[in-house]
Amino acid sequence: MERTVRIGGASGFWGDAAMATPQLLRAGGLDYIVYDYLAEITMSILARARAEKPEMGYATDFISLTLKPNLVEIARQKVKIIANAGGVNPQACAAAVRALLAERGLALKVAAVTGDDLLAQKEELARAAPAEMFSGEGFPAPDKILSVNAYLGAFPIAKALDEGADIVITGRCVDSAVTLGALIHEFGWQVEDWDKLAGGSLAGHILECGPQATGGNFTDWESVIDRLEDIGYPIAEVVADGSFICTKPEGSGGVVNVGTVSEQMLYEIGDPEAYLLPDVACDFSRVSISAEGKDRVRVCGAKGRPAPDSYKVCATYLDGFRGGLSMSFYGIDASRKAERFAEAVFKRARRTLRGLNLPEFTETSIEVIGAESQFGPQRRINSAREVAVKIAAKHPDASGIGILLKEATGLGLATPPGLSGFAGGRPKPMPVARLFSFMLPKRTVSIGVEVDGRLHNLADAPGTHFDPTQLVHPAPPLPSALEDPVPVPLIALAWARSGDKGNKANIGVIARRADYFPYICRSLSTEVVAARFAHFLEGKVERFVLPGPSALNFLLHEVLGGGGVASLRNDPQGKGYAQLLLEVPVEIPRALARRDHLL
């Protein structure tokens, strides 16, 4: 039989469910369990923790909730662990793991991968003044910078495993590297094995968001809702050519089907022919995704090109403060009452700012959620009887946000009738950590792999310059004719998933059947998508075609109000954008609609 490496994905973010590790261990037969804890904002939080206590700066619940209850069973089953839980202090995280091993009397080797943390070089970087890779903005002032981290690749992880590590702790690496590093080690893949590296990276991309591959955030949510509390975490069974089966523990909740895996493949990838990672430039446009049995989906056909010559580096920096709160109104004219109340809050807050000679808010936001005004003409609710009003702002000083929050509370007895809300403490001003992304030549970054006191210095392969303008993108298939057309909602024809990339939103749309795809391509133009999101969109819309899975990927530029915690939006990561797009009507032949009972 062909050799298979079985890898379980147990964490998609810092705070994921503690049930994942014991569930995967009960399933048995795993070679590795991998964990992804880090997002850009997580790095700034961990950097502040390290600044307060030098021994901190890593995901502490990796020790307390993941390893401590499960370490004996992990050792018994000889499952290797790879996690980017090290955050901005992988050495401290590794030391905590070793202390836990000593406490349990277990003789496992622990490795820490270092080199991604470039905070000590912030003055030098400021002098070099790289431009922000998306907006072109200038490099932030060094005294404002919280964190600077290069996205490392998978070969340092493979080196740690080559040196006998049982548990590998990294700082910032690309999310899929924790999976790809294991596969490079197991199969002996080299830097020129581009298609294999692309396939392994895709396996990591499917695993990196945990249960999003097994029914979480799924278009057909009703098919998994009955056992959502027991949802299974994904397992990739990978063979030497980089193809794999995606599955989940037997008896767990959720589902693994073509739809769940396809949605996760398109999640936040931008241009599917130029998904750039430190180890390989991936092309997922012709990937084949097919059912191989109950909760078993085969994925193959990823292609790769030589790795880029630079790392993506993300810095986070302080940019004032933000704050806000939500209240609800119900009854007659609820939305008008909410809007008028929010306007009064800002009028009173601005008057107080002027009286104290404080500057104006740098940005404000009023969102009446549940009312037509929130999404313009795309919302069909014309006279909501209950709405939530979200009031938020940014200000250079925490005191300015404090004034807004106090005045919003102080108007509580002067509002229009119908104000309600669950009681709780008043929110506090929070620092805004903005993201600054740029490219840095690989030759300028030194990587260390420390295995139980022994340090190995290494450098990634230099890579080559990648020019996406040289790509020839496939044209969309279009129907030859459209006789007797009838409109059906996109959700009847497709699955869709959305997410963020900084200030960009990514919406992947996958045809449920290949013969639906030409009609989806005909109806879902960039103009249609731009009109759908005109209330938020400030940039352009790009459309990419994936002939393999019969899918489209849309990239909406400058649409998230800055994205992450830099945004005041109710959905700063675009997680619900696919749900708005799935209502768009698509014209298909009446005969096709009748055949599939879509009328």
Image (cartoon, grey):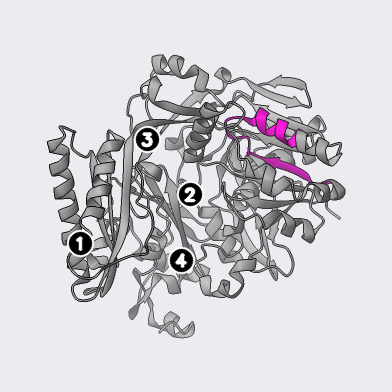
Q: Is residue 241 visible?
A: no
User: What's the distance in space between the residues labelled 4 and 3, CA to CA?
Assistant: 31 Å
* Sooner in the amino-acid sequence: mark 2 or mark 4: 2
Instruction: State the CA–CA distance, disc 1 to disc 4.
Output: 55 Å
- Is 95 inside the magenta-drawn segment? yes
Question: Residue 517 — which label?
Answer: 4
- Measured in 3D between alpha carbons, the distance from the residue under mark 2 to the one under mark 4, in whole angstroms, is 21 Å
Pointer 2 residue: 268
Task: Give the spatial CA distance, label 3 vs label 1.
Answer: 46 Å
Q: Quadrant of the C terminus?
A: bottom left
**Amino acid bearing label 3:** Phe
Q: Which residue is mark 3?
A: 134
At x 18%, y 33%, the residue is 358
Q: Amino acid at mark 1?
A: Leu
Magenta part of the chain: 78-98
| Image quadrant where one finds the N terminus | bottom right
Q: Amino acid at mark 2?
A: Glu
Query: Could you tell which of marks 1 and 4 lies nearer the N-terminus?
Result: 1
Q: Which residue is mark 1?
A: 413
